[in-house]
Amino acid sequence: MDLKNSVMVCGFGVSGQAAARLAGYLGKYIVIVDENSTREMREQAAEVRRQYPGVKMDLYFSWKEEITLPRCELAVMSPGVRRGTPLFHAAERMTSRVASELEFALEHITCPIAAITGTNGKTTTTELTTAILRASAIRAESAGNIGHALSDCAIEVCERRVNYLVIEVSSFQIDTISKFPSHPAVILNIASDHIDRHGGMDAYAETKFRIFSGSLDAPPSARILHSGLLEYKKRFLPPGLPVTTFSATDHEADFTLENSIIRFHGREILPFAESALKGLHNAENIMAALALVRALLGEDAIFASCVRDAIRAFLPDAHRMEVFLEKNGIKYINDSKATNPHAVNAAVATFASGRNIILILGGLDKDMDFSELAPSLPHIRQAFLIGQCKEKIHEAIADKVKCKMSSSLESAVKDACSIAKPGDCVMLSPATASMDMFKNYAERGCRFKELVTALLTAAQQSS
């Protein structure tokens, strides 16, 4: 076996499966390793064999420390495989180099790229940037942490089916990259999240700033930053390095919101009210997308009518401030994608009118600081707490907000709907991950909508 032509894929979820497909496309010898063994994994491995019949592949499902892995040139780590775990250590011992799935894919991509990271707003900004590029007659694709693995897009680029890529990048994906390639990139915001993985806010922020590590010699337009992160910039980037800034509240930023109009250096782009996106955080997501388009296509591009039309036509993603029902003057909002306090604050600020929010909080803890919910508390009439960390949330907010511990999402929804009155918002905005009770945030959001709809339908039939 030629070690220089071999790839060990560690973790065989969505990212690992895509990495195996890319390795097969490149004609590599593939070693697939996962501590689990499921029917889906076996089926996906068989599909890679079918697609690339000339490629040699070995499978190590249900892997344990005592099982010796073969030597390979490169180990590709899925985001779920943490540093310090037995599998990570084993891969380090048996390979010449460890890379994330993102880094592996980037090494085989030659088209222009825009990269987006931050605690919140990544998916909205990624999809909006892609929509603007497509409106500008460019074959662009969204990829990365958004669900379409970058390794699959790398194949599309190699086959000339895509000309530009817009990549959502999580801190997990950056974590194993020593130097991010030189591409336009934005950091949207940094707030408490994934502290269990990174060990503290400083380490988390430093990981985010690695997205600029390869673009230090690029023009300032390639380094895009919320102006509220300039203190982090002083710590993690070279002194005096110029950047492009955006902010909905700082009128000194390059992209601003003034008199409800999104502007660049004072020049009007469009009134924010013309967008279907609501809330100051979404105004900033639009600015970030425009800044990326400026970096890729030039300043004139952001003032084109097709760009304004794309922003006007763009609709927010499901499970993110999704007003899915309005009945008897009460709004029912599915914000299941709000997996940290910063995201909850954005949702509450968007819909608050006095103390009118009936909020369902809780789920799987990521060692976050729930005291960061403080800006939302004056607007919460009552909170219903669920999941693994409901006691921790109770401790952080119960002195300011009436709280009730709920045994399940079903119980919380029933109680929340029972006290709602005209003008209220019944909102699932959990501030936590979902995996203690659900497969993912989407399943949690769908279940919330089902429960609310069933309750209201039953109430209507009995009246």
Image: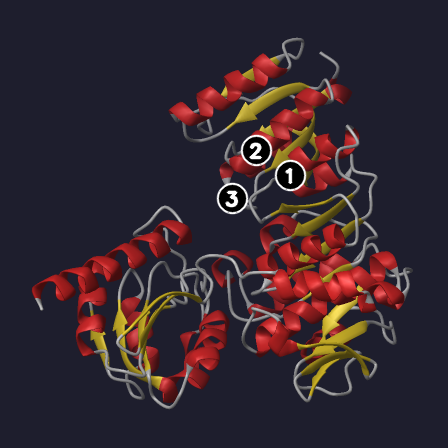
For marks 1 and 2, the one nearer the N-term is 2
Sequence-first disc among 2 and 3: 2
For mark 1, what is the residue?
A: 101
Return the residue at label 3. Answer: 80
Element on which disc 3 rests: loop
User: Which of pointers 2 and 3 indicates the residue nearer the eye?
Assistant: 2
Residue behind mark 2 = 16
Judge by depth and name the residue closer to the eye, 3 or 333: 333
User: Eyeballing the image, is 165 above or below 345?
Assistant: above
How many neighbours does mark 1 have within 10 angstroms: few (below 14), some (14-19), or many (20 or more)? many
Q: CA distance from mark 2 to mark 3?
A: 10 Å
Question: Where residue 148 sits: x, y (%)?
Answer: 59, 41
Q: CA distance from mark 1 to mark 2?
A: 7 Å
First-in-chain label (1 vs 3): 3
Quadrant (top left/top right/bottom left/bottom right) for the N terminus: top right
What amino acid type is highlighted by mark number 1?
A: Glu
Q: Amino acid at mark 3?
A: Gly
Q: Residue furthest left?
A: 462
Position of residue 81 in the picture relative to residue 291 (left or right): left
- Residue type (three-letter) at the residue carrying disc 2: Gly
Q: Is residue 48 visible?
A: yes
Callout 1 secondary element:
helix
Q: Nearer the viewer, residue 261 or 286?
A: 261
Mark 3 and mark 2 in contact (Cβ < 8 Å)?
no
Query: Which residue: 53% across, 18% down?
Result: 47
